[in-house]
Image (cartoon, grey):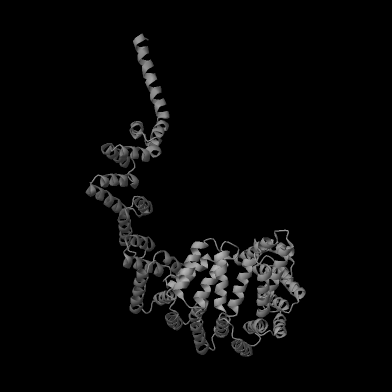
Amino acid sequence: MTLKLKKSLFWAFFFVVLVGFSQKGGLPLADEYFSAGEYAKAASIYQNFVDDASKLNTFYAKYLTCLAKTKNTETAEKFLKKCIKLYPQNTIYSLDLATLYQNNDRQNEANKIVDKIVKSCRDNPSLIAETVENLNKKGYTTACKNIYLQARKSQKDDFIYALELSEIYKIEKNIPEMIAELIRVLLMNQNDKEFLKSKFQLYITSEDEFAAFESEIIQRAQAEPEQYLYNDLLLWINLQKKDFYRAFIQAKALDRLQKLNGTKVFEVGKITAENREYEQAIAIFDYLVREYKSAPIYPQARKSKIETKENWIKNTYPIDLVQIRILIKDYENLFAELGKTHEGFETNRNRALLYAFYLDSKDSAATLLQTVLAQTWMKKDFLSTCKMDLADIYLLKNEPWEATLLYSQVEKDQKETPLGHEAKLRNAKLSYYTGQFAFAQDHLDVLKLATTREIANDAMDLSLFIIDNTGLDDDSTHKALQSYANAELLLFQNKYTLAQDSLDAMLTKYKDNTIEDEIYFLQAKLYRKMGQFEKAIKKLETIANRFKSDIYGDDAAFMYAEIVEQHFKNPERATALYNKFIIDFPASIFTAEARKRCRILRGDGMSF
C-alpha cells in the first residue's frame, strides 16, 4: 500500500469518527446554546440533524423556535415541508406551516392548509380526535367546529359531538347555537339528565344566557308537548330562578303527563321548604294532601306539611308557644290517621321534642319517646336517634347520669357511623357542661377525625375552646369556663332568664378574661332566641370591633348577616355583609354557605 493511499484512508477514517463524534455530542451542545439564548449557534447545529428522522422529535420545537427568533423564515418553511413529507398524517407540522404563513401575511396559503386538514378528516374519521387536539393547541377553533359539523353530515347523525360543539359556540359567544347543542346533549342522554343539568352551570353563566335558554325551552315545549324533557327543563329552570310557584305548576303538569302520583310536586315542595319559603312549601304539600289521598305520597306529604310549619315557627323569634301547641295537636291528629306505622311513630318523636324543649313538659316527652323505643321492629337508625333524644330530655331534667348511659349505648350500637359519632359528641358536651373538661377532651380528640365534616368541625371548635380557656394554670380561668358551661347548659334547657342573669354576672366578674368574647357571643345567641335582635346585634358588633380574630370572630360575623337577612329583611345589607364575610374569613366553615346566600339574595339564575 502506497504512502498516499494510507494517508487518504487515514483522513477518511478521521472524518467518519469526527462526524460521528460531532453528531453524538451535537444535540446537547445545541440545547446548551438554546438555553443560553444563542439561537443562531443552536440553529446551525440543529440543521445538521434535519435529515435524521429518528431524532426529529427531540429537537423539532427548539429548532423551529431558533428559526423564528433569527427570522429565518425561508429555512423554517423548507424544514416544515420536509417534516410534512416525512410524516404526512401528523397535522402538527402542517399547522406549524400554516401558522408560519399566517405570521408572515400569507393568510390564503394558511387557509388552504387548514382546509386540507379539515377535509382529511372527512375521508378518515379516525383522525378526528388527534386532529382536533392539534387544532385546539394552535387556536384554530373554527376549524375544529367545521370538522365536527362535517362529521355530522358525513355520518348522518345530528347528535354526535354536541357537547364539543357547545364548548366551541360558548367560546364564539354564539349563544343560540350553544343552547341548541346543549339540548341535543340532553336529548341524547336523558337517563343522565340530572347530572347534565348540573354541568350546564359551566356553560350558562350569565342572566342573558339563562333567559335565552329559558325562551328556547318554552318554544320547544309548545312545539313538542309530547317531549317530557322540555317540561322537566322548565321545572329545573324555575327552581334555579327560585320561582317556586311556576316550578309547582310545571311539576303538576309532569306528574299528570307521566302519571308520577305527585312525586315531582313533592320534590318541589321539599326544595321550597329547604329554601325557607315556608308559606309556599306548605301550600304545595297541602295540594298533595288534597289531591293524592290514596297515593303512596300522601303520608309523606301530610308529615312534610306539618314539619315545614314547625320549621317556620321555630325560626321565627321569639317562638310563639300557642303555635307550638297547635303543632302538637296537628301531630296528634296525624298519628291517629296514620296509625302505628313508621311515619306515625315519627310524628310521636316530633311531638316529644316540642313538649320537651318548648313547653317544659319533659315527662310527657319522655313517655312518648319510650313508646317509640318499644317498637323494636322499626329501623335501627331511627331508634338510635330517638334514644339520643331521650338522653337530651334527661339532660333537660338535670339527670346527666341517665343521659350519658343512653348516649353511650348509641355509641356502642352505632360504632364508626355518623350516628355513633353524634352520640359521642353529645357525650363530650355533657362532660363539658358538668365541668369534666379532660374527659370531654378525650372524646373530642377522637371526633376530630370523624367522617362527617359537621361533627368534626363541632368537635374541633369545642376542643379549641376548652384548650383556650384551660391552657393557663389559673384557677380563675377554670372557674370562668365552668360558669360559661353552666350558662350554655341553661340556654340548651331554654331557661333564658337564668342564662341571661348568669352571663351578665360573668361579664362583671370576668372582664378582660380570655373568655370575654365567648360571653358576648353566647349573649347574642340568647338575645336572638328571645327575639331581641337589636341587643343581639350590639353584642355581635362588640365582637367585630374587639375580638374579630378570636375563636368566634367568624361565627359572630355570619350570625350578624343572618339576622339582617332573616329578621330585618334587608337583602341589600345582608348581601354586603355576606360578601364582606367571604373576604374577611376565606377559610371559615361558613364561607361556602355565605357564597350560597349571596347568590340567592342576588337572584342569580344558577343558585344551587
Q: Which residue is rendered at x = 36% and y = 50% of the image? A: 137
State whether residue 589 appears in this view: no
Q: Position of residue 108 (x, y in %)?
A: 22, 49
Question: In this orientation, which residue lies closer to the viewer: 168 or 400?
Answer: 400
In the image, residue 554 sits, relative to residue 563, either above or below, namely: above
Left or right of 122? Residue 20 is right
In the image, residue 507 sits, relative to residue 127, either above or below, namely: below
Residue farthest toward the top in the current orientation of the protein: 2
Q: Position of residue 37 (x, y in %)?
A: 37, 36
How many numbered marks appear? 0
Q: Which residue is rendered at x = 36% and y = 17% of the image? A: 11
Residue farthest toward the right in the current orientation of the protein: 401
In the image, residue 71 sits, relative to residue 169, either above or below, namely: above
Question: In this orientation, which residue lies closer to the viewer: 157 or 538?
Answer: 538
Question: In this orientation, which residue lies closer to the viewer: 414 or 18?
Answer: 414
Q: Which quarter of the rendering shows the N terminus? A: top left
Q: Position of residue 447 (x, y in %)?
A: 67, 63
State whether residue 142 appears in this view: yes
* Quarter of image, res 321: bottom right
Q: Position of residue 250 (x, y in %)?
A: 42, 80
